[in-house]
Image (cartoon, rainbow, N blue to C red):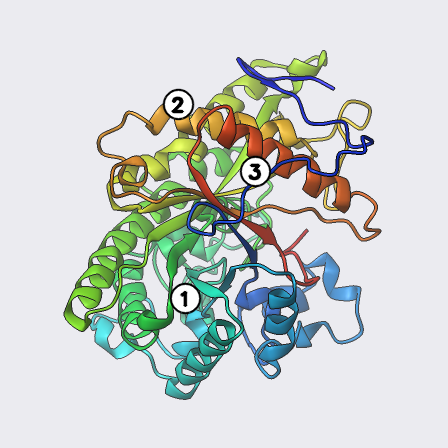
């Protein structure tokens, strides 16, 4: 079988062949390694976070699928279960996170002294330390994520006084307005000017206490998709869903508010934490742990590419996604990224500024994402072309670590699609490395266990 790429030809092996080796990645973990991933909001029980509140309000479909959904996976009370299962897969890297709200349960966005919002739950930080030691005790390295789609409750839901002051606008006459859209108060999240300082204050103690056990740092997971779905779409906490197209477009494109403003604050936080990690390693004589980001990439196509009638909006949206969602965040941080993590799940067809489905042309996963191993080659090739000769891109420079597939997987309740999905994507990854020369150093599968999968 031959699948045409833009300027490449990806030819996976015939999987019905007697030859069992689809791709050979070698057995040297310094050259290429395997990992498994999870996140606190998916895995930890006893966590009163924004996602739990969001789910209780009826915004998470998977909330109704199991009898005790609030228990999640008991990774907080019984961490060894998941870690033992992960180690049994033979992986070399265990990706996990720490929850900001669990460690700093009391703060407010307008707190002028960020030092008051350093780690408050010392017992929880010590428990995270024991969990990291447990993972390392099973022979795995640790990739630690500091922010994985979960802003603390104190910065997510508008307070009573904010709601009262805004009551005259929060009416049926203006149904798309929400207090957090004002960019101030307790609902502003990453739009707030104090957000970066408060996040760094939390990170100071995490780095100091856990840094010697961390082999890779991911400061932000999917910052572009998080700021878009939370700030601009209302599809993630705190909600409510935004229905006005004008509001969505303004939030996604206006640097004075919404997604871009939030991303700028995230960039500022990343830069400060990168310097903090390096300074702490030097002061304490620790080895240098590569620092990166886990950046979501989709192989996007306008609806019209499939022979469907489509207006210019679809093509303009796809261009916007390539310019702003694909490259902008990495461009702003490329000199302080030791590795560029890529989360890739599949193809997105764009219609009217939103994902569309084409059931006759595209195979879909259980959560409605188009399956396309070819797309993985496409996005890796495009990134390699953009950054391989960029002197400012640390991750491809002489001291850089290259790329890591920080997430790849499929929602498949039947397990009928998953085996072929994994094999096809590993064949695609092998093609990107061996034929196109993309320096990918590791592959992390999402996820170690079933979970809510956010609001899908």
Q: Secondary structure at mark 3?
A: loop
Residue ID for mark 1: 155
For residue 202, above or below residue 121: above
Residue 437 vs residue 353, the one in the foreground: 437
Q: Nearer the viewer, mark 3 or mark 1?
A: 1
Q: Quadrant of the N terminus?
A: top right
Real-space CA distance between mark 2 and mark 1, rounded to the nearest whole angstrom:
39 Å
**Residue 127 % position (x, y):** 46, 83
Q: Quadrant of residue 12?
A: top right
Residue ID for mark 3: 244
Label 3 vs 1, first from the N-terminus: 1
**Residue 391 % position (x, y):** 22, 30
Real-space CA distance between mark 3 and mark 1, rounded to the nearest whole angstrom:
24 Å
Can residue 352 be spotted in the picture?
yes
Q: Residue at x 35, y 83 (%)?
A: 120
Q: Which mark is residue 385?
A: 2
Q: Secondary structure at mark 1?
A: helix
Label 3 with label 1: CB-CB less than 8 Å: no
Label 3 vs 2, first from the N-terminus: 3
How many marks are shown on the rendered structure? Answer: 3
Residue 419 vs residue 256, the one in the foreground: 419
Q: Residue at x 45, y 57 (%)?
A: 179
Q: Quadrant of residue 216?
A: bottom left
Horizontal side of residue 81 vs 293, given as left or right: right
Real-space CA distance between mark 3 and mark 2, rounded to the nearest whole angstrom:
37 Å
Q: Which mark is residue 390?
A: none
Q: Nearer the viewer, mark 3 or mark 2?
A: 2
Horizontal side of residue 288 vs 122, given as left or right: left
For residue 28, above or below residue 199: above
**Residue 123 % position (x, y):** 42, 88
For residue 299, above or below residue 120: above
């Amino acid at each position: 079988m031959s699948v045409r790429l833009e300027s490449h030809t990806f030819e996976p092996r015939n999987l019905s062949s007697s030859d069992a080796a689809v791709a050979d990645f070698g057995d040297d973990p310094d050259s290429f390694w395997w990992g498994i991933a999870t996140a606190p909001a998916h895995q930890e029980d006893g966590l009163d976070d924004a996602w739990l509140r969001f789910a209780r309000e009826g915004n998470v479909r998977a909330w109704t699928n199991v009898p005790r959904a609030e228990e999640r996976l008991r990774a907080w009370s019984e961490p060894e279960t998941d870690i033992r299962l992960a180690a049994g897969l033979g992986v070399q890297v265990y990706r996990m996170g720490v929850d900001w709200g669990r460690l700093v349960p009391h703060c407010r966005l307008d707190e002028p002294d960020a030092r008051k919002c350093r780690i408050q739950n010392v017992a929880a930080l010590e428990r995270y330390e024991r969990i990291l030691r447990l993972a390392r005790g099973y022979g795995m390295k640790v990739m630690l994520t500091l922010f994985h789609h979960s802003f603390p409750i104190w910065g997510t839901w508008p307070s009573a006084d904010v709601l009262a002051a805004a009551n005259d606008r929060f009416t049926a006459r203006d149904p798309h307005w929400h207090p957090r859209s004002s960019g101030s108060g307790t609902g502003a999240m990453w739009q707030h000017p104090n957000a970066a300082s408060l996040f760094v204050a939390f990170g100071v103690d995490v780095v100091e206490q856990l840094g010697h056990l961390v082999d890779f740092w991911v400061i932000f997971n999917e910052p572009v998709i998080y700021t878009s779905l939370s700030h601009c779409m209302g599809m993630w906490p705190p909600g409510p869903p935004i229905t006005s197209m004008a509001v969505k477009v303004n939030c996604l494109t206006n640097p004075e508010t919404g997604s871009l403003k939030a991303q700028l604050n995230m960039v500022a936080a990343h830069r400060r934490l990168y310097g903090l990690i390096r300074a702490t390693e030097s002061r304490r004589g620790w080895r240098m742990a590569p620092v990166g980001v886990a950046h979501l990439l989709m192989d996007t196509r306008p609806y019209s590419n499939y022979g469907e009638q489509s207006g210019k909006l679809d093509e303009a949206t796809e261009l916007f996604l390539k310019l702003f969602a694909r490259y902008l965040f990495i461009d702003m941080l490329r000199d302080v990224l030791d590795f560029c993590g890529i989360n890739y799940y599949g193809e997105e067809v764009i219609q009217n500024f939103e994902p569309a489905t084409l059931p006759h042309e595209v195979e879909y996963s259980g959560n409605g994402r188009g399956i396309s191993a070819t797309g993985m080659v496409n996005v890796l090739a495009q990134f390699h072309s953009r950054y391989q000769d960029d002197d400012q891109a640390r991750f491809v420079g002489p001291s850089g670590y290259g790329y890591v597939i920080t997430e790849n997987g499929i929602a498949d309740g039947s397990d009928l699609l998953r085996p072929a999905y994994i094999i096809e994507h590993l064949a695609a990854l092998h093609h990107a490395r061996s034929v196109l020369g993309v320096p990918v150093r590791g592959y992390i599968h999402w996820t170690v266990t079933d979970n809510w999968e956010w609001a899908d």
